[in-house]
Image (tube, rainbow, N blue to C red):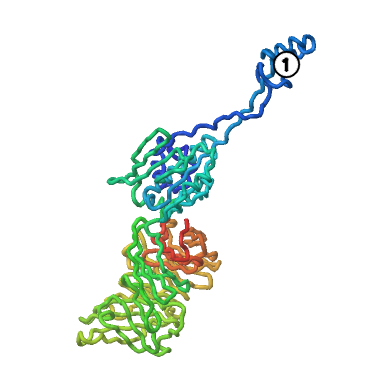
Amino acid sequence: MTSLPTALEPWAPWLTLFPPDLAPAVGALLLRLHPLVGKLSTATLERGADPAGIGNIVRRGQYERLLMTQWVYADAEPDEFLRRAASGELLFNGPEPAVHQRSLHSVVLFDAGPSQLGEPRLAHLALFILLARRAQQAGARFSWGIWQLPGILSEDTKKEGLRKLIQSRTLHAAPANAREQWQTRLGGDLADCWLIGVAGEAPRQARERVAIRRALCGNHLNVSLRQRHDYRTVQLELPDAPTGVRLLRKPFAPRAPAGVIHHHGHQPSRAQAPRFASGGNLVCAPQLNGGAIVYHVPQSASVKPGKPRIISAPKHGAILAAGVFKPALSCITSAGGTLGFHNFPGPLFSSKPIMCDRPPLEQFHAPPGMGRWLQTFYLLANHNVNCYEHVVVLDTKRRLVCWQAAPAASHKVASTVSFRAVLDNVIGADQLGDSLYIGCADGDGVQLYHWHRQNATPYKMQRIAQQGSRLLHGALKGEHAGHSGNLLALKTGPSRWWVGSHAMGEAMDIDDNAAVLGVAISEKHPKPGLVVLHPGRYRIELRVGHLRYTLATSPEAIQQASMDPASARIAWITAKSSTLVVRHIDDEQPLLQISCDRDIDES
């Protein structure tokens, strides 16, 4: 917090402990209750028995304090001395009694039991700050305790003290002899003792009592103070429910954006990167148990994400290949020599369970026990008056293969599925909407293919007259939106990349072992660049030529990261806490942040 209203400045040491959006709510409670509390009298003076020095002249006293002039009578006129002594006419130095300053001690006892749970604890929070400040102004010692814990006092009035007060709630009543125990603990010389919310008989030291009750209607509390012979009441308006909940649960934690949530039981795998649906509106996090969770990615950081879809691990076999094409994971499972197709969006692959024999290894190279799922695509085709569905997979030998489902002769039987190889030497394939864009190494160049859902097979597009080992696609933005071309990034050497579009491009080097995630145009630079994970693994950058721009940073190392080429959204999983984060390359706030049980906020 940078500044406070003038009226709240006396409590700045406490209000600055809260996040800026919570401090005004606490300040409103303080201003309303402050007149009820009043000031604490400064430390009082008491006279001691021991003299501090010579005071005035008196007619009575000890003879060692007799004035020197009086001893003259004893020597010169003894009879007159005796007469004066008998009649009380002798003069003595009167002693000046010592004046001591009593050290003032203020004690506050809070009822943390069942009658004060919920909203009354907001008043406890405000009164704690007010009474601590009141004692500080008077130069008094301040202690506080919980009525249910007789004899235990704390002098911590800062952040930890407030945290202990908030966390001290209990469902248990105070011991039957709590009054006697506290009376013994407080001693006999206590001048200022407050009971907050405590019902029943009070210790004899307690002269100030505050009763807090919920109002029968409205969003306020009825707070009353009995102070010796004075009695005052006030209606305390409460903050809105979400603010009140935050003050009672996590008063010092900043407000999390709408997309920041904790998922109980969430155990993401750090062996493979998150997977986007085309367009970036869904993201899938593979799980340690062999299943997955699909999350809705909101359009902005202020929009709350939808309910996640949990996909259990297959009962038989394991997931071999997967993609996200609807609010569920579409996958191919492998069990022995059989493949199963699950949750694909079209009617042919999803109407009935489809099982087929696994192709020979020389036609479809996907050895068992792989640590990652194969890249999978889906196209719904309409040609020759019939409806066909294509499930396309890129295997580990860079071969693009396809399972095509055709309508069955009868609705009582499953669709017929045929397998075929489509393209070899595939160095990159990405799905942008209803189209699949493919690049194949072709001698001394790269042949580009486009496979639209209305076509049975891919057809050739431009050819890039450069050799390459990896091809990335990206969607054009702004004034280029709607053009048939896409951004391209081609790896032409160990650290050399060619970045541009179908027509033209520029060469650049990634010579520090940064992991390239994708190609995009950012608001930070008008030209296309490579989105990379820095080798230090704590930030994601945009690199355009020799220029570097930080897109996102992480408080802990990033284990896996990915990018959706259509939406320019990036996702990563952290190495220590397995937190999943999704954001756009040009946004400051995450669109989605999922923490798991290993990273619970304790604040």
Front residue (pair 107, 502)? 107
- Secondary-structure class at tag 1: loop
In this rendered view, identify the residue nearer to me: 410 or 10.
Answer: 10
Count numbered badges in the picture: 1
Report the residue at 33% width, 68% height from top: 484
Q: Relative to residue 345, is residue 100 depicted above or below?
A: above
Q: Residue at x 44, y 48 (%)?
A: 19
Residue 67 visible somewhere in the drawing: yes
Q: Amino acid at mark 1?
A: Leu
On screen, residue 559 versus residue 569, left or right, reads right
- Asked if 21 appears above or below 600 in the picture, the reply is above
Q: Position of residue 180 (x, y in %)?
A: 49, 47
Q: Is residue 64 left or right of residue 336?
A: right
Residue on which disc 1 sits: 67
Task: Check disc 1: other Cα within 10 Å, few if <14, some if 14-19, many if 20+.
Answer: some
The x and y percentages for residue 350 are 27, 79
The relative height of residue 315 versus residue 40 in the rendered view (above or below) is below
Does 111 sit above or below residue 305? above
Question: 18 or 169: which is nearer to us?
Answer: 169
Q: Quadrant of residue 277?
A: bottom left
Q: Position of residue 590 (x, y in %)?
A: 41, 59
Q: Position of residue 195 (x, y in %)?
A: 44, 43
Left-right relation of 90 to 528:
right
Visible in this render: residue 505? no
